[in-house]
Every structure is written in structure tokens, then in C-alpha cells.
Image (cartoon, grey):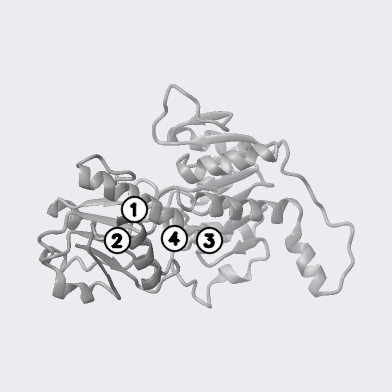
Amino acid sequence: MIAVTDSGGFVKIDADQIDQAMRREFGDTETWKVYSDFDSMLPDKENIEIILNNAPLNPAKLDQFQNLRWVFSYSAGIDRYPLRELSKMGVVLTNTSGVQAKPIAEQVFGAMIMFSRNLITAFQNQAARAWDQTIPVSELADQNLLVVGAGAIGREIARKAKAFDMHVTGIRNHLTDELPTHFDAMFTMNSLESLIPQAHYVVSVLPSTEATRGLFDISKFELMNPEAVFINVGRGDLTVEGDLICALREKTIKGAYLDVFATEPVPKDSPLWDLDNLLMTPHNSGPSQHYFKRAFAIFVQNLRRYRRGEPLINQINYELKY
């Protein structure tokens, strides 16, 4: 049986919507049920083979699901999953990597244009009824964009960057013989510090791992061009927020855009709120009206692969944690 969890989160799964979609794709060949949270699945724990998941999984009770074989994460992020327990149980975990690429890339460029055309100051002037044609503005054309994390989201950012005539450099863990489309150059993480000084925009789309937590600290910000803008749409713990606050206050860098934070929601007394060169959004760069359609398409394709005993798309490597 397939269990579908609906936690009412930002990618809320509507029970009627999932029911219609499942019937349209599988008819009577699959059995499924929508649950409100993890505990509501417990009465059916012996029958559940697959979880299409949008809720926290309780590691202390997970081993009660003796017939669980596959968890499909309805989001791309898997850092909140009990990876050790799932791995020990031999459960396959997959995610929706790639589903959020288009909206996140659009939001990244929205932020970049905010800074390049100085729309933040324009909005402030509008509120103050001030007509000021002297505010400095620039273009994205011919600017150096450094994309740290050249996965599905990073590749979509690079694709859109070419429409703005930007020079795009990527960073990934492992290089291949062929340069990915839309990138002008590709390097490994070992080259991060040597590449940062040349970048006008540094965009982080990395997952949260032992190797990436705290990656962007004061040492990285001090290497950046004074006119550089730092953007993080990966995970909040990639950035040492205290160091970023210092860099923004001291104008070490021009500005920053954050969609992810160390603590969410951001506490009301956080100094982040007071920075006039910081753009913030509440971890909402991923959702769009197309999210369910795209995510469900991956689930359908994977379910058919699963039934045929074929490798699944977006399978998580428990050792690498992505």
C-alpha cells in the first residue's frame, strides 16, 4: 500500500488532488491512503510499502514499519530525514530534485535584478515619495556569476544567465569530461577560494552536509569583490549568519539575498531584519503552481520503475547525504 502524508506545509498535498491523480495514473492497480501525519499511519504500519512523504518521520517509531521499502520525499531537501534509520532498514529514499529548478532560478534572478537595477533603493524612495534619478544602476550583462552547486537548480540558473549575457562559472564535487551546457567553466570545490574574488554574484545551491555546513564564513566574504552580491537558496546552515551580518554592516560586500536561514522562522529580534543591503524571503523560492504536477510526474515514473525492479530516479546516497 502507498501512504501519502499531508503535513499542511508549504507544499501541501490536497487529499482530493492526490486521489484524482492516483486514479488517473493507476486506476485500480494501486492502493493508497492519505494520512494527516506520521502517527496517523501507525494503525496501517504493517500494510505500508511506500510513503509519498510530506511530513516528519519519527525515527523512534520508524522500525515498526516492517514492510516499508521506499520513501518518496515530496521535497528536494532530505537533511531532516532520519537517514541512519532508513539506511539500516534498507529503505530506498528518493526526492524531487529538479522540480524546484525553474521557480528557484527565477527567484535568484529576481534578487539579482533587485541589486543590479537598485530596485531596493527605488522602493524605499517610493515609500518616501522621493524622486531621485541619481541612484546608481547597472546591468547583469558581462557580469561574472559563480554557481556553487551545479545540480539541477544550478544548471537552470546557468541557462537563464546566458539570456542575460553573463559569464557563468560552476562548482561541483566531481568534474566530467564534458562541460555542462550554459557554463563557461567548471571547477571542483577545491577552487572555491580562488574563484570567489572574480565573481560579481555568488549563488549557493548546495545541500546541507558535513562538508558544506558553515562553508560561507567571514573568510569567504572577505575574499569577495566589494561589489559582489551573495545569494543562498541552498540550506541555511551553509552560511555563518553572524559573519554575513558583519560583512553586510561593514560593506565588505555589496549585498546579499537569503531564502534559507539557520533558524526558521527568523526570530523577530534577529539583526538580519535591520540590514538595508539584505533581501530576505521566507524559504519560499521553490513552490509554484506547477509543483504538484512536476513532483507527481517523478513519483509516477519512479513507481513504475519500482514495480519493474529498475533503479529509481533521484535516489539518495546515504553516505553522501544527497
Q: What is the number of the mark on residue 299? A: 1
Q: Residue at x 37, y 50 (%)?
A: 298
Q: Position of residue 223 (x, y in %)?
A: 57, 42
First-in-chain label (1 vs 3):
3
Kindly identify the amino acid type of the residue bearing the numbered disc 1: Phe
Q: Is residue 166 above or below residue 291?
A: above
Q: How many angstroms separate mark 2 from mark 1 (CA)?
A: 8 Å
Q: Position of residue 187 (x, y in %)?
A: 48, 30
Q: How many angstroms separate mark 3 from mark 2 (CA)?
A: 19 Å
First-in-chain label (2 vs 1):
2
> Label 1 crowding class (10 Å Cα cut-off): few <14, some 14-19, many 20+?
many
Q: Residue 235 falls in which quadrant of the image?
A: bottom left
Q: Residue at x 65, y 42 (%)?
A: 200
Q: Is residue 267 above or below residue 84?
A: below
Q: How many angstroms separate mark 4 from mark 2 (CA)?
A: 12 Å
For disc 2, the marked residue is 52
Q: How many angstroms separate mark 4 from mark 3 (CA)?
A: 9 Å
Q: What is the number of the mark on residue 110? A: none
Q: What is the number of the mark on residue 288? A: 3
Kindly identify the amino acid type of the residue bearing the numbered disc 4: Phe
Query: Looking at the rendering, in which quadrant would you find the N terminus?
Result: bottom left
For disc 4, the marked residue is 292
> Label 4 crowding class (10 Å Cα cut-off): few <14, some 14-19, many 20+?
many
Q: Position of residue 118 (x, y in %)?
A: 76, 56
- Identify the element where label 1 is drawn: helix
First-in-chain label (3 vs 2):
2
Kindly identify the amino acid type of the residue bearing the numbered disc 2: Leu
Q: Residue at x 17, y 54 (%)?
A: 69
Q: Is residue 178 above or below residue 82?
A: above
